Amino acid sequence: MTTNKLQLFKFGDGVWDPTHRFVTSWLLSPWALFAVRASISLYAFFVLLFAIFWEIARLPNGGATARFSFSYFTILCYWGISFYFFFAALHTFTYARSGIPLLSRFSRPLQALHSLYYSTIICYPILVTIVFWGVIFRVSVPVGWFPTSFDAWSNISEHGLNSLFALFEICIPRTASPPWIHLLWLIVILACYLGLAYVTVATKHQYVYSFLNPKVAQHGMVAAYVFGIAVGICLIFAVVKGVVSLRVWVTETRGGRRGKFAKVGELQIADVEMQRFEGKA
């Protein structure tokens, strides 16, 4: 029994992603998938960098404000989105160009980390969107809407479009349903962030989020918020896992759309792999 449980933490010893699910789509060609992912990465980086320069240029003590922004889970997640789509675009580009993605040349631990990275991208943005619009917005923006166009654009980008980017990765690529073990790591990462939030209090003497401040939210409510977020990520992961499984079933099992693969000359890359690894399904 113990041996079977330990198997969950192994990287595996078979062929990893033999049909290139991470770099192909049931709807888009590899080149189109690369273009969309690269565009999302560029936009996300633009949002982050523009916001930093805007704060430095327009706000009193803007440099400190920009530095403090790296303590926000939202901003850390958005940097994660930026870099994920950058690397996803890079892997997709190498696959579209040669039929062999750079991801296939990685060591097994790095491949496993990319898979976990994917799980964070399809879950955390949804959590961020729900918490911001459901909890933070009504407290931080009591007038009902953002006071400036910049605030509206940056917040919609970071707390709205982030979930749209996640939905793209849930629905469009051929990625398989994430394993349940990833839920454990999602919770561990959130726990690590909680520690970071209180390290920020100790070093900067400022709470990142008011609901983590016992003087504002009271001790019982702080625990309730933390527990609620933990339950929230569990529910989000379960729903996302189900949606990805449904997408695979609808597009591949029912729709017969096995995917659009790279072509080198007249050879359809991954045809052999599809027959070998999925032909018995």
Image (tube, grey):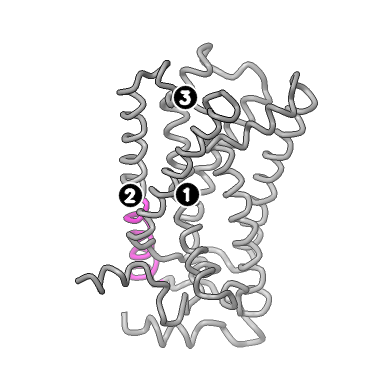
Asked whether 103 falls inside the magenta stretch, the response is no
Which is more toward the observer, 99 or 229?
229
Relative to 252, residue 145 above or below = above
Of the pair 18 and 208, the residue shown nearer to us: 208
Of tags 3 and 1, the one toward the viewer is: 3
Q: Where does the image place residue 256, in percent across and percent down from the top left?
A: 39, 72
Q: Main secondary structure of the magenta part?
A: helix
- Mark 3 Cα within 10 Å, few/some/many (few <14, many 20+)? some
Q: Position of residue 277 (x, y in %)?
A: 40, 83
Marks 2 and 3: in contact by CB < 8 Å?
A: no
Q: Quadrant of residue 217?
A: top left
Q: Residue furthest right?
A: 57
Find disc 1 in the rendering and name its residue: 167
In this rendering, is residue 212 above or below 15?
above
The image shows residue 211, relative to residue 188, as above or below, that is above
Q: Quadrant of the N terminus?
A: bottom left
Kind of residue indicated by mark 3: Ile
Q: Quadrant of the C terminus?
A: bottom left
Residue drawn at x 36%, y 37% is 229
Q: Earlier in the sequence, mark 2 or mark 1?
A: 1
